[in-house]
């Protein structure tokens, strides 16, 4: 199964594509889609939409996994990222049809067994699970790979136990 993992963002949206077969995961590609602060907000959303469409067309994922948002303080940032996330959700569901969402807690739990793990621990586990010599950079791409791995493992265990 090919999985596209996405770490939503307005300035930087991370993506990670993995193939997962019988519990073995391999990296296909990872990176980021960038938008400039100097660009008008609607244009930034259009850049994200175009980028997500291109990723789906290029990698033809069977399923897409997306990290749910979590913000503590900055309401303006949260609203902007939420709007970008809305564009990502709509594009993914229209272009692929199979979309799954995971909270940061679920991702940490799935990769480390501990829901309060530090970012560095998650990144190290991503490298370990994917057989990489170094932690993927930038951080947004590593986060997207973590989302894809979470879905691969959740999907595998759900299938083993007849859970949908």
Image: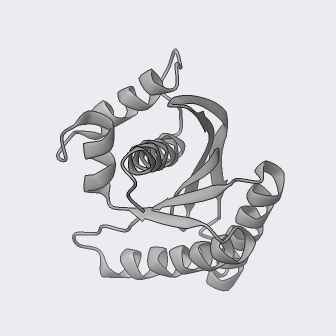
The answer, for residue 83, to whether it is visible in the render is yes
Q: Who is closer to the viewer here, 106 or 159? A: 159
Going by the image, does 39 lie left or right of 150?
A: right
Which image quadrant: the C terminus? Answer: bottom left
Between 80 and 26, the one lying in front of the other is 26
Residue 79, picture quadrant: bottom left
**Quadrant position of residue 128:** top left
Nearer to me, 134 or 151: 151
Q: Is residue 35 above or below residue 73?
A: above
| Residue lying at the far top of the rendered structure | 133
Q: Is residue 39 visible?
A: no
Percent coordinates x, y for residue 62 in the rendering? 68, 55
The residue depicted at 77 percent of the width and 69 percent of the height is: 50
In the rendered view, would you say 153 is above or below 126?
below
Q: Is residue 13 left or right of residue 151?
A: right
Q: In the visual, does 126 lie left or right of 114?
A: right
Vertical position of residue 50 compared to residue 66: above or below = below
Residue 100 x, y percent position in the rendering: 49, 64
Query: What residue is drawn where x is 29% and y is 31%?
Result: 121
Query: What count of labels does the image hold?
Result: 0
Residue 85 image offset from top left, x and y in percent = 52, 74
Which colour style is shown?
one colour
Residue under the point 30% across and 40% down? 119
Query: Is 79 or 161 nearer to us in this picture?
Result: 161
Q: State the image quarter where residue 91 is shown.
A: bottom right
Q: Which quadrant, please, contains the N terminus? A: top right
């Amino acid at each position: 199964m090919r999985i596209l993992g996405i770490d939503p963002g307005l300035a930087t949206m991370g993506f990670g594509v993995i193939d997962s077969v019988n519990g073995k995961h391999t990296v296909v590609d990872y990176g980021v889609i960038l938008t400039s602060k100097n660009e008008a907000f609607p244009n930034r959303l259009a850049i994200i939409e175009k980028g997500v469409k291109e990723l789906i067309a290029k990698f033809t994922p069977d399923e897409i996994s997306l990290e749910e948002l979590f913000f503590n303080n900055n309401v303006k940032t949260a609203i902007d990222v939420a709007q970008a996330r809305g564009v990502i959700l709509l594009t993914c569901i229209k272009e692929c049809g199979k979309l799954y969402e995971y909270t940061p807690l679920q991702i940490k739990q799935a990769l480390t067994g501990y829901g309060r793990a530090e970012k560095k621990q998650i990144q190290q586990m991503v490298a370990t699970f994917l057989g990489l010599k170094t932690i993927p950079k930038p951080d947004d791409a590593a986060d997207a790979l973590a989302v894809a791995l979470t879905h691969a493992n959740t999907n595998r265990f759900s299938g083993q136990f007849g859970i949908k």
